[in-house]
Image: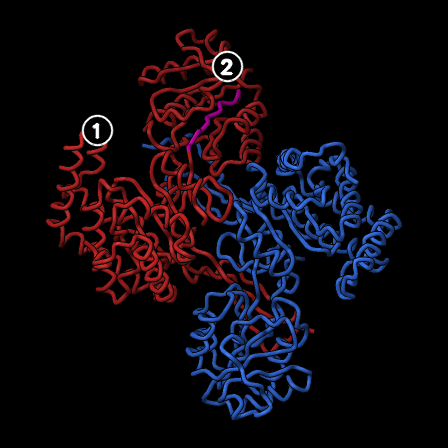
Chain colours: A blue, B red
Amino acid sequence: MLDQAADTTDIHALMADLGARARAAARILATAPSAAKDAALRAMADAIEARSAGILAANAEDVARAEEAGMAASFIDRLRLDDKRLAGIAEALREVAALPDPVGAVTAEWTRPNGLRIARVRTPLGVIGVIYESRPNVTADAGALCLKAGNAVILRGGSDSAASSAAIGEALRAGLEAANLPADAIQIVPTRDRAAVGAMLRGLGGAIDVIVPRGGRSLVERVQGEARVPVFAHLEGLCHVYLDATADLAMAVEVATNAKMRRTGVCGAAETLLVDRRDASRLLPPVLDALSLRGCEVRGTDEVRALWPDARPATEADFDTEYLDAIISVALVDGVDGAIQHIERHSSHHTEAIVADDEAVAERFLSSIDSAILLHNASTQFADGGEFGFGGEIGIATGKMHARGPVGVEQLTSFNYRVRGTGQIRP
Amino acid sequence: MLDQAADTTDIHALMADLGARARAAARILATAPSAAKDAALRAMADAIEARSAGILAANAEDVARAEEAGMAASFIDRLRLDDKRLAGIAEALREVAALPDPVGAVTAEWTRPNGLRIARVRTPLGVIGVIYESRPNVTADAGALCLKAGNAVILRGGSDSAASSAAIGEALRAGLEAANLPADAIQIVPTRDRAAVGAMLRGLGGAIDVIVPRGGRSLVERVQGEARVPVFAHLEGLCHVYLDATADLAMAVEVATNAKMRRTGVCGAAETLLVDRRDASRLLPPVLDALSLRGCEVRGTDEVRALWPDARPATEADFDTEYLDAIISVALVDGVDGAIQHIERHSSHHTEAIVADDEAVAERFLSSIDSAILLHNASTQFADGGEFGFGGEIGIATGKMHARGPVGVEQLTSFNYRVRGTGQIRP
């Protein structure tokens, strides 16, 4: 267990101390050279490998406890580590080390008529709190992304993975120390007391700048409801695929099937299929045949069932449901404007796709819908920081403040203005 | 008075209705062409001019009430409109019309190895709530900047300027209608009931995306303390000027005097002067002579008083005080690192300046301090959206989320990702 757990029993004092340590570490990290941060990330990867026996032993404790408690096999699978998964964690740390450093990047630069040169420069956000469920790899992934952007991080994983997270956390802190960076830049909350989460959501007296929840809907709902600091999150991904009358049929089949069925449990999976009423008889049956053949249950409106009778009847609630399962709701709409209207009413503002050959129709879709990610002729399952080239993501945000869509290292930064003059004074 | 005040007495129903109207208007504005928004802004300017008699009559009511209530002369001066001030308001509207439209601007664009072309594009934030004190010009300025960025706005001015704000608001709404945009894109809260402010701070049931308070410390404190939606604001501007041993003396005198004395009541005014201990005997006396000659009271530490005996003794509290007056606190520090340490401890993270000939020293200052604006060899009084070339500002933010420093039209936007493919599916 981490040393900061030592002998305090007061959860609030413990959390306040964590916050103060994180803030102090963030001040040092803010001006740490890229080379030091990258050296730390590589040293973390080395430490994960060097300590693999200890980490696997800690993980075995967590797994045994979960089995005793009768947790579901899928839950235990996500919890379990092995040599291959540990190698993956180490590899991901080295990939983050290889990313460009976002801190110090000049995102805009201009000169005023009075000769003042103004630059907008990326700076770290400060201290990030991550609250996640029982996937031990998040400890390393989230810690690495926050560090890369010059932030300190306080990690609070699920109770079920506490031993695994603590062991991984010690490896990460060893990596920081090996690069002469403060170990407190990455801290694991050393208690299973749920009051620790409440304290984080209140911001630890100003010590936490932003909270990132990673987990299911109930976790995100609690965080969004209670947090008194900004939150980067999405509550759900109720993603739509719209097939325009100008869609290529083969592409429509491919994209719709991939968007729904590649993985049904991810937030970028499609939940609703909208088809242009003008050409539904051409598009609908082959697409629904393909989905059905892949094992997808189809729920359609009466119009849909007239064209494809195997569909079960869809209720209004179906169009507001994130199934995260092999089920899709289907409706006909009046062209792209009908699709936009349907999406405005039902979307979670995450990701929507259009399949269309008509560029003007596609541009109307892309420019009219208020969602984080809009795709033309591509699958919604590309909603992912890795697929965007961000080298990993700490999550996907559907809010419109600061971060939106996949949150990679760039969006874990703030900025300031640096103004260079030659003695200018304001008249 | 505005029609939505008509016959409702329930403040919550009234505010919920305002929020719903704003949200509906925001959806239309989000895709309104630049030409329509700019036409509306110019029509607003025309309407301000055409209705000047009515606006001045409404303002005369406000002024008479304020005089009866015995308000201070400075307060009444800020409240009072005349032909020249109205012409200034109309001119400012035309200047906002002439700015480039931030909405639709592509801020990044790249192609993935699989051929997907990804663009990050600016989009409106949605609905902005502005809560301000009794300067009627804010009604037009804030309304114009929000509209330019494609946002709807709900404006709640001080009770003392209610008649002026309502009359200006009607002119703005007439301008929107003249351009066939929804009048509800700009709404003035039609009640003096303070419960309306509380409702706005709670976000009107999700209808308000961000709150901008404009006014004194107590207003900003209330807003920051109670708001359940993001806030763009600064509580105070405790700005520092640091004179390095490598500073040019004449420049040091000019910059320090301008930073403190050009206008003492603005948030970018300097409150503390820090001088490099290594060369204080050269720098300090002429700078303090110049400040004193301009009528500034000097409060210094014992070291400062040893070099310049006219200084009054400074207490520790002086270095945490935003005077907004002709008073400056002065201390010696050990070079740029000493200055950075002092600023870390006392700054409000608004604006800090260094005067130095040594570029490396200046870069250390600019890259080490966590404030919104850092200047080298220039006055802190440049902390202003107009001086930055933003064509106006809705305020200055010291938070690190989303907006920081002067908040112009660009920072009143969000963004989304638009991905263009040729049928890509995710393997």
Which residue corresponds to the image point at 70% horizontal and 50% vertical from the top-left?
A157
Q: Nearer the viewer, residue B340 or B7?
A: B7
Magenta span of residues: B236-245
Mark 1 lies on residue = B72
Task: Check disc 2 and report its element: helix, strand or loop.
Answer: helix
Instruction: Name the amino acid, label 1.
Output: Ala
Q: Residues within 10 Å of mark 2 (few under 14, many from 20)?
A: many
Q: Position of residue B55 (x, y in %)?
A: 15, 48
Residue at 81% in and 53% down:
A62
Residue A363 colored in magenta in the image: no
Give percent across and percent down for residue B28.
Answer: 35, 66
In this rendering, would A77 be left or right of B250?
right
In the image, is A30 to the left or to the right of A6?
left
As rendered, which of A196 and A380 lies closer to the eye?
A196
Is B246 rendered above or below residue A344?
Answer: above
Q: How many marks?
A: 2
Question: Which residue is identified by label 2?
Answer: B280
Residue at left 32%, top 55%?
Answer: B15
**A255 left or right of B64?**
right
Which of A387 and A110 lies nearest the eye of the viewer?
Answer: A387
Asked if residue A200 is positioned above or below residue B4 in the image, the reply reads above
Q: CA distance from mark 1 to mark 2?
A: 41 Å
Number of other residues with Cα within 10 Å of mark 1, as a class: few under 14, some 14 to 19, many 20 or more? few
In this picture, is A235 found above or below A40?
below
Q: Amino acid at mark 2?
A: Ala
Q: Position of residue B344 (x, y in %)?
A: 55, 29
